[in-house]
Image (spheres, helix red, strand yellow):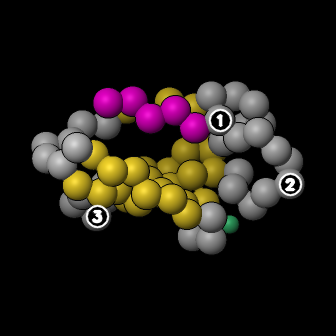
């Protein structure tokens, strides 16, 4: 699976994204303005996966089914 994040505004603290994987490992990527950033990863099973800005303020959840 490949996640694609595209930052669309300068008015945000989310200039990088941190995805927390199943095993607790974190993957962090810088998000340049308007440039899609791809993160490839594999999921052994269904579950939830959190992502957030690097200060853990802007958050979301990805559900793997
Ligand atoms: Cu933040």
Magenta-drawn stretch, dominant element (helix, strand or loop):
strand
Q: Earlier in the sequence, mark 2 or mark 1?
A: 1
13 lies above or below 34: below
For discs 3 and 2, the disc positioned in front in the rendered view: 2
Label 3 CB, ligand 1: below 8 Å? no
List the residue tagged with mark 3.
Answer: 24
Relative horizontal placement of residue 64, taking residue 46 as reference (left or right): right
Q: Residues under labels 3 and 2: Cα distance?
A: 29 Å
Q: Earlier in the sequence, mark 3 or mark 2?
A: 2
For discs 1 and 3, the disc positioned in front in the rendered view: 1
The percent position of residue 34, horizontal first and vertical second, equals 75, 31
Q: Is residue 54 visible?
A: no
Label 2 CB, ligand 1: below 8 Å? no
Q: Earlier in the sequence, mark 1 or mark 3?
A: 1
Contact between labelled residues 3 and 1, with CB atoms less than 8 Å apart: no
For the C terminus, the quadrant is top left
Q: Which residues are magenta?
A: 1-5
For the N terminus, the quadrant is top left
| Image-quarter location of ligand 1 | bottom right
List the residue tagged with mark 1.
Answer: 6
The percent position of residue 60, horizontal first and vertical second, equals 51, 59
The verdict on residue 2 being magenta is yes
Q: Residue at x 62, y 64 (%)?
A: 58
Per the image, label 2 sits on a secondary structure element best described as: loop
Q: Residue furthest left?
A: 44
19 lies above or below 57: above
Tell me the crowding category of disc 3: few under 14, some 14 to 19, or many 20 or more residues within 10 angstroms, Cα based.
few
Q: Residue at x 63, y 44 (%)?
A: 30
Q: Residues under labels 1 and 3: Cα distance?
A: 24 Å
Residue 11 badge? 2
């Amino acid at each position: 699976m490949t996640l694609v994040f595209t930052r669309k505004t300068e008015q945000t603290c989310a200039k990088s994204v941190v995805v927390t994987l199943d095993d607790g490992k974190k993957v962090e990527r810088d998000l340049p303005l308007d440039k899609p950033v791809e993160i490839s990863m594999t999921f052994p099973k269904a579950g939830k996966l959190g992502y957030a800005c690097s200060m853990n303020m802007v958050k979301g959840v990805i559900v793997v089914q």
